[in-house]
């Protein structure tokens, strides 16, 4: 959600909802008018955006589920409790009881084999990559490689050549092996600084540095013909853009990437994918499409294992409570405090 | 209670809850290896069916990568179903472990966090034992992005309903870093754009100098700088609106005008601390004009009887005993000379300001004075600095006191001048943000011109034409070495050794094999040159041990991989990476076929010599 969208959404809510959101977030929120309240909430949301958004969505959900039941308990709370709630931090613990270990462990196992179904974001990305540059920012293990493979397949079917780059030689080797299995060994080549294997293949795997060097050679006149037929450049692990030593190589590669080739940037979850997309839009011929989602394909649960072998859930909730690092499971909290007390040298203040 | 859970207990706890296979992230390579050993000692044996499955899977990998067939860890991994995986291992061995993990034959892999960023293989569970990571020489807290990258390995698509991230404490863990990382949003990424020498050369080869600014403007760095500049511009616009009521008044630039007027007004008193200020050369005399001092006037001489201030007079006054017992009053300014002669003259409070005896004695002594007396050297201090011109002008020059808008100016001045200062500061920073990349580029250009890679018109010289092909770290040092003919006639092994010491950036210590005299003298030469280049390029570590190691590998073709590993304390994986990076550097030198055929030939010989054994298996 962008700040503008958030502001709009807040503006649509009745002021009562805003006050409930402001509880524990904004001091003396009951004195503020609606405009001012929205302003204060937005200011506060900068500290913990995810938690704020999730709270807002739950409140909206509650209202839609039953407008009266949502607001009733609030009026019934005695004034003292009200005050307490207001003075508590935004990480106040929810009222539901924490989940038990058995609940937490439920559902372990291998799912029945299912036919592969594309995720909506994968469909969206693949549809877009034919026309424009695409930036994909999704959590680890969501199936970015599938998009890369499909995009490469489609480009090769159109007789356009494809370059796939990864930050590490080890990754290049893995991908080379993987792609050779999928497309057949004659369709895939690999380029390293001193060696070429099947260098004329339509799909070339290399590290980003090698591609940058190719682009420099092409720019300075030592024309490499394959750059004219280059249809798709896939930059895997694009979050390396922020690498202190090597990030510059990704920038150079993107700046000098031929305009007829489509760029496909695959990246793990990052905080500002929109910036990357806006940047690409500003320097490339076609506007760049951003595909992002933050939901993991396989849900994640967090646990705490005490050195004595006792396992408990880490958080009160089954999943990860986005934006609420304080929602620890009471047992995990207790055990960890015990651990710290025993291991920390006495007299050292605990953080 | 132990400070952290024993690896065997850890895995059995996970197994009991069906949480395997798991990846256990540990702090160091040594911790991974020790965990393996602990398993080895724990008499833990897999059922034969699983052992056979592992053996079969390993055989498949060996078919492609025969070098791991002899790997000492194979029987252990087969027996216990657990493996270590870190950067100290050979890439082929890591491939084997990854393959075993992918096929689900292993219960656990002990890994360092470097794995999280690199190769991907998932598991049902990841175990996190630390909240910080070793970066260059320091431990820093994991960022939210890194925590999520690590946790992201949990849960295999199509093989698991759920993935688990289990935190188990060890000393120095900070739980809040991990919980915040798990629940928070990943950090925004920032551009790390730097302008290197090869980048400048390659840009200037392909584009005219005047286009470069436009190309730099296309970088993500500039995009982000522009974002910051835009924020400032918005602030500037807001300031502009705030400044509107403070537009031109009677004077166009009334803020400056009032500022100088106000300053002059305030400093009027410090400029004239007393109405009777003497010029410095006079005031310097005052301490010496004490009773009994002999002084000279335009006519005749006298003895000072007292020094005093008088209400009606601008200057300090003196009472002087003149010849023929005359007592006169005169201002200090009328004193022409101060002589290096004093008489004893105790002061009294009434006329003639000394006792009658003294008065008679002094009159007598004054008559007896020789014609020539030595002068007292008095240094006038000139440290009272002149005030700036704008303020020196007297208050009468200002129209402000009589100006009709005087009261308005006085009221608004503080606000307006604060706003204007802010405006100027923002304008300056916006300019800096917009042009900083270009300035950095220009700095690089100047250095390259100094070394003769670029002409004054920013054309590539003959040197620049080949130097732009060296696109690696320490490029300036390498090209300067080539120009200094340091490698001419050098053996391929020497070239490889030197490039290895340039390529290696790790500071893990290693015991080294004996270094040959040729290499050590060449390395000394390189070190000297690197030091002389240090204002323009950071010098590399230039470790002699890695240079000697690579030299041996290239020079001695009978040396086996095991033999090479025995020469040093470096881990196998580190040696492999060292050789791989050396290959990269050599292949850059190899591109100089056109201009330096001998050197390029030497480089390709070195490449051929390095590529044998383990190094031949992966492209």
Image: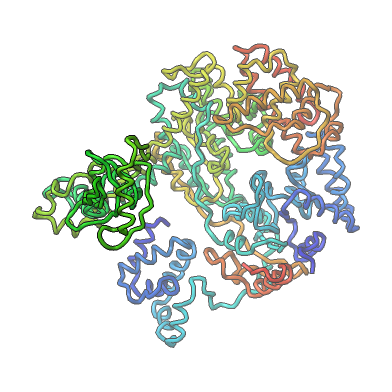
| Left-right relation of A49 to A37 | right
| Left-right relation of B27 to B273 | right
Q: Quadrant of the N terminus of chain A?
A: bottom left
Image height check: is B609 above or below B54?
above
| Left-right relation of A104 to B195 | right
Percent of width and height locating residue A247: 54, 39
Percent of width and height locating residue A166: 60, 37
Instruction: Specify the quadrant of the image occupied by residue B372.
Output: top left
Percent of width and height locating residue B276: 23, 52
Image height check: is A10 above or below B247?
below
Task: Return the residue nearer the eye: A12 or B472.
Answer: B472
Task: Return the residue nearer the eye: B344 or B441.
Answer: B344
| Left-right relation of B19 to A257 | right
Can I make out residue B157 in this image? no
* Residue drawn at the location 54% of the way across and 60% of the way down: B184
Can I make out residue B119 in this image? yes
| Figure coloring | rainbow
* Residue drawn at the location 33% of the way across and 41% of the way down: B369
Task: Return the residue nearer the eye: B141 or A149.
Answer: B141
Image height check: is B607 above or below B163?
above
Q: Quadrant of the C terminus of chain A?
A: bottom right
* Residue drawn at the location 76% of the way across and 64% of the way down: B3
Q: How many labels does the image show?
A: 0
Instruction: Specify the quadrant of the image occupied by residue A289.
Output: top left
Percent of width and height locating residue A296: 57, 56
């Amino acid at each position: 959600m962008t700040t503008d969208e958030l502001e709009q959404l807040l503006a649509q809510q009745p002021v009562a909802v805003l006050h409930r959101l402001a509880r524990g977030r904004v001091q003396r929120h009951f004195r503020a008018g609606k405009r001012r309240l929205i302003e204060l909430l937005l200011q506060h949301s900068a500290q913990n955006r995810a938690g704020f958004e999730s709270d807002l969505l739950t409140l909206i959900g509650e209202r839609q589920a039953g407008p009266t039941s949502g607001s009733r308990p609030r009026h019934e709370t005695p004034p003292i409790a009200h005050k307490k709630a207001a003075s508590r931090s935004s990480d106040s613990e929810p009222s539901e009881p924490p989940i038990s270990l058995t609940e937490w462990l439920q559902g372990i196992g291998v799912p029945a084999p299912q036919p592969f179904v594309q995720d909506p974001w994968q469909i969206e990305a693949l549809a877009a990559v034919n026309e424009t540059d695409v930036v994909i920012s999704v959590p680890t293990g969501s199936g970015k490689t599938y998009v890369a493979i499909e995009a490469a397949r489609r480009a090769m079917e159109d007789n356009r050549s494809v370059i796939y780059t990864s930050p590490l030689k080890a990754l290049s080797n893995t991908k080379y092996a993987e792609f050779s299995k999928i497309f057949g060994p004659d369709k895939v080549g690999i380029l390293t600084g001193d060696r070429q294997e099947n260098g004329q293949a339509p799909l070339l795997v290399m590290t980003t540095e090698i591609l940058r060097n190719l682009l420099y050679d092409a720019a300075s006149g030592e024309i490499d013909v394959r750059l004219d037929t280059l249809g798709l450049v896939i930059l895997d692990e694009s979050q390396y853009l922020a690498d202190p030593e090597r990030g510059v190589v990704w920038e150079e590669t993107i700046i000098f990437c031929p305009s007829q080739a489509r760029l496909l940037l695959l990246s793990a979850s990052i905080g500002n994918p929109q910036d990357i997309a806006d940047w690409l839009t500003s320097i490339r011929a076609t506007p760049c499409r951003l595909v992002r989602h933050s939901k993991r394909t396989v849900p994640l649960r967090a646990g705490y294992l005490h050195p004595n072998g006792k396992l408990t859930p880490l958080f009160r909730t089954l999943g990860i409570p986005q934006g609420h690092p304080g929602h620890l499971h009471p047992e995990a909290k207790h055990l960890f405090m015990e651990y710290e007390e025993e291991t920390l040298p006495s007299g050292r203040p605990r953080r | 209670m132990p400070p952290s859970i024993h690896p065997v207990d850890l895995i059995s706890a996970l197994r009991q809850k069906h949480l395997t296979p798991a990846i256990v992230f540990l702090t160091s390579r040594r911790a991974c290896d020790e965990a393996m050993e602990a398993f080895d000692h724990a008499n833990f044996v897999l059922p034969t069916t699983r052992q056979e499955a592992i053996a079969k899977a390993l055989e498949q990998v060996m078919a492609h990568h025969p070098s791991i067939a002899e790997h000492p860890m194979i029987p252990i991994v087969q027996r216990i179903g657990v493996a270590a995986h870190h950067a100290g291992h050979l890439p082929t061995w890591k491939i084997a472990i990854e393959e075993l993990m992918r096929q689900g034959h292993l219960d656990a892999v002990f890994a360092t966090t470097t794995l999280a960023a690199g190769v991907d293989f998932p598991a049902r569970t990841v175990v996190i034992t630390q909240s910080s990571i070793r970066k260059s020489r320091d431990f820093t807290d994991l960022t939210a992005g890194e925590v999520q990258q690590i946790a992201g390995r949990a849960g295999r698509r199509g093989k698991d309903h759920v993935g688990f991230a289990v935190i188990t404490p060890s000393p120095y863990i900070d739980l809040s870093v991990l919980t915040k990382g798990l629940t928070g949003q990943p950090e925004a990424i920032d551009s790390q754009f730097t302008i290197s020498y090869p980048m400048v050369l390659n840009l200037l080869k392909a584009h005219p100098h005047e286009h470069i600014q436009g190309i730099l403007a296309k970088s993500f760095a500039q995009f982000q700088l522009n974002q910051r500049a835009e924020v400032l511009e918005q602030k500037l616009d807001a300031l502009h609106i705030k400044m509107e009521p403070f537009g031109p008044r009677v004077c166009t630039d009334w803020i400056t005008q009032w500022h100088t007027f106000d300053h002059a007004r305030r400093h009027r008193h410090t400029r004239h601390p007393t109405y009777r200020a003497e010029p410095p050369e006079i005031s310097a005399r005052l301490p010496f004009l004490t009773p009994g001092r002999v002084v000279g006037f335009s006519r005749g001489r006298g003895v000072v009887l007292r020094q005093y201030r008088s209400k009606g007079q601008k200057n300090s006054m003196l009472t002087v005993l003149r010849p023929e017992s005359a007592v006169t009053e005169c201002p200090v300014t009328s004193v022409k000379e101060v002589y290096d002669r004093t008489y004893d003259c105790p002061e009294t409070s009434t006329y003639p300001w000394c006792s009658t005896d003294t008065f008679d004695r002094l009159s007598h002594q004054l008559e007896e004075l020789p014609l020539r007396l030595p002068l007292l050297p008095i240094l006038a201090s000139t440290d009272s600095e002149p005030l700036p011109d704008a303020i020196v002008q007297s208050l009468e020059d200002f129209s402000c006191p009589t100006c009709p808008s005087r009261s308005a100016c006085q009221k608004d001045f503080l606000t307006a001048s604060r706003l204007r200062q802010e405006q100027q500061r923002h304008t300056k920073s916006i300019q800096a943000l917009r042009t900083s990349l270009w300035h950095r580029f220009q700095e690089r250009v100047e250095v390259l011109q100094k070394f003769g890679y670029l002409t004054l018109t920013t054309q590539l010289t003959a040197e620049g034409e080949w130097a732009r092909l060296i696109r690696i770290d320490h490029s300036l040092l390498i090209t300067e070495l080539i120009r200094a003919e340091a490698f001419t006639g050098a053996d391929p092994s020497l070239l490889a050794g030197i490039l290895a010491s340039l390529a290696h950036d790790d500071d893990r210590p290693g015991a080294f094999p004996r270094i040959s005299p040729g290499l050590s003298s060449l390395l000394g030469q390189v070190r000297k040159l690197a030091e002389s280049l240090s204002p323009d390029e950071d010098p590399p570590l230039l470790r002699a041990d890695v240079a000697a190691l690579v030299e041996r590998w290239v020079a001695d073709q009978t040396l086996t991989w095991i033999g090479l590993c025995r020469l040093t304390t470096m881990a196998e994986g580190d040696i492999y990476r060292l050789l791989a990076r050396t290959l990269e550097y050599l292949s850059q030198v190899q591109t100089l076929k056109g201009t330096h055929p001998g050197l390029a030939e030497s480089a390709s010989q070195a490449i051929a010599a390095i590529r044998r054994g383990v190094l031949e298996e992966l492209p």
